[in-house]
Amino acid sequence: QVQLVESGGGLVQAGGSLRLSCAASGRTFNTYAMGWFRQPPGKERESVASIIGTGHRRDSIEYGDSVKGRFTISRTNTESTVYLQMNSLKPEDTAVYYCAAKLDPFDVWKYWGQGTQVTVSS
């Protein structure tokens, strides 16, 4: 069992920055990967970034094409918190951002946070 809580969302002007946090609790030692997803209003959920091997020394990081070069995912050494640093924000980044976790390479993203709203004004 893993519990996830996101924070750090808010209202920001285009070109600005925000840092999202995802605090994990429970059996985090079983976590294989953690990721950030977002759902813009009226659109489907999409992947933003993921980090595989959280808590190990061989992390693998992936980003969605729309955020490459602007967003950075990172974690604490204890695997208790995952961050998403968002720079050069655009209005199209406006969405509810969700933190998620999976327990092995063949697992679904079965654990989810409640989401945090990010709104970017033009």
Image (cartoon, rainbow, N blue to C red):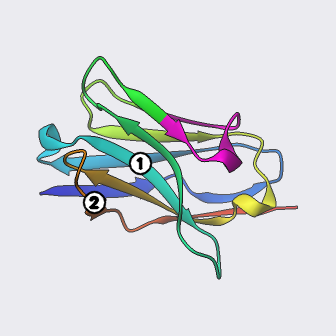
Q: Name the residue under label 1.
A: 35
Left or right, 98 with respect to 121, comes to left
User: In the rendered view, would you say 42 is above or below 5?
Assistant: below
> Mark 2: which secondary structure?
loop
Does the residue at mark 1 contact the one at mark 2 (Cβ under 8 Å)? Answer: no
Circle 1 packing at 10 Å, graded few (<14), some (14-19), many (20+), is: many
Left or right, 2 with respect to 99, comes to left
Query: Residue at image x 22%, y 55%?
Result: 107
**Distance between the Cα atoms at labels 1 and 2?**
12 Å
Left or right, 23 with respect to 28, comes to right
User: In the rendered view, would you say 93 is above or below 76?
Assistant: below
Work out which residue is located at the far right of the displayed protein and give it: 122
Question: x and y percent of residue 105 in the render?
Answer: 25, 45
Q: Nearer the viewer, residue 91 or 21?
A: 91
Give the magenta range. Answer: 62-73
> Mark 1: which secondary structure?
strand
Amino acid at the residue labelled 2: Val
Q: Nearer the viewer, residue 107 or 102?
A: 107
Instruction: Work out whether mark 1 precedes mark 2 in sequence or the reverse, and give the earlier one.
Output: 1
Residue 109 is a magenta residue: no
Q: Name the residue under label 2.
A: 108
